[in-house]
Image (cartoon, rainbow, N blue to C red):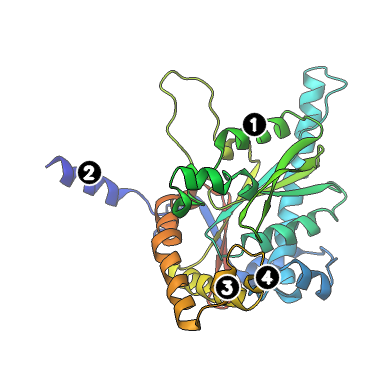
Amino acid sequence: MIQAARDKDQADIPDDFGNRDYSPYRFFPAEEWARFRADTPLTLTADEVQRLRSLGDPIDLDEVRRIYLSLSRLLSAHVESSQMLFEQRKQFLSLSDEAKTPFVIGIAGSVAVGKSTTARILMELLSRWPSSPKVDLVTTDGFLYPNAVLQRENMMDRKGFPESYDTGALLRFLSAIKAGKKDVKAPMYSHLTYDVLPNSFRTIDRPDILIFEGINVLQSRNLPADGKIVPMVSDFFDFSIYIDAEETLIHAWYVERFMRLRETAFQNPDSYFHRYATISETAALAIAEGLWHNINLKNLHQNILPTRPRADLILQKGRNHLIETVALRKL
């Protein structure tokens, strides 16, 4: 009886995507979204876009015009609004030497969905707006526990899951950023060795905007019973973006990327995945499918997709890896 009531209550919860009458989002087809660009100039070249995009991502200047110019205009408006509010609050509190803290943009989504390309394109576009000349990009990869720790804890097959990150270090980093600290260190990660680089850091020195990209950055967690202030990563975000696509498409993109890497980066003898370049194509394909179903699909279902409704903006991609719909949270 109780379970039946719970099932009914669950069914009555409005679906942000299934029932748009109750959705907190406004939905725009790509063609309509493109009109919000207004007179925003295209400041990127074709060569720059090619340099910024990830392997297998077909984004080009047309996609930048169609989606990213409008998005950069929207984000720039949010940045300028936060700067105006900061000045008003500074006047209200009679503060003279207070400095504005960075505007933080979080970007989440599954592996192989195009988060890195989106982050790099936005970093370039936003840095060309007069309100935000200094833009930095940090990924969560550097906050993973080193492979030695994951191996010792028998967690290598959970790499990328929430428990594989040094959450304390991650929160300390974002706390320092939002506290306006100078020269905050971000740990470095190597995709060649598939590991955190020991004693290697980037210095982030009070940018106008910080883009923080990672698969689980919108995840929530249990709150402490004693009411202590223990923040979540997303508590530090001023704006959040989720890159979305159908599960079947993400699966196909992941496998395609794995097979492309087998012909490129995996060929390097120093690559952690070099062994996959030396086996047959059939065997490599079987491994890619296994990695998807046993690790990445589980992470998508358990940890990543449930965070989608927490985003301020959702970019929904179609079969050709290009964005078809933009969902923007209503104010």
> In the image, is 276 to the left or to the right of 204?
left
Q: Residue at x 49, y 48 (%)?
A: 151
Between the residue at mark 3 and the residue at mark 4, the CA separation in whole angstroms equals: 16 Å
For marks 3 and 4, the one nearer the N-term is 3
The x, y position of residue 200, in whole percent, is 74, 44
Q: CA distance from mark 2 to mark 1?
A: 38 Å
Q: What amino acid is labelled 2 in the image? A: Arg
Q: According to the image, label 1 marks what residue?
A: 172
| SS class, disc 3 | helix
Q: Report x, y in % for residue 258.
A: 55, 72
Determine the residue positioned at 39% across, 54% down. Answer: 15
Left or right, 11 with reference to 80: left
Rounded to the nearest angstrom, the CA distance separating label 2 from label 3 is: 41 Å
Task: Rate crowding at label 2 as few (under 14), some (14 to 19) or many (20 or more) other CA atoms within 10 Å.
Answer: few
Q: Name the residue carrying label 3.
A: 257
Q: Secondary structure at mark 1?
A: helix
What label sits on residue 6 in the rendered view?
Answer: 2
Which residue is pictured at 43% across the width and 47% down the height? 154
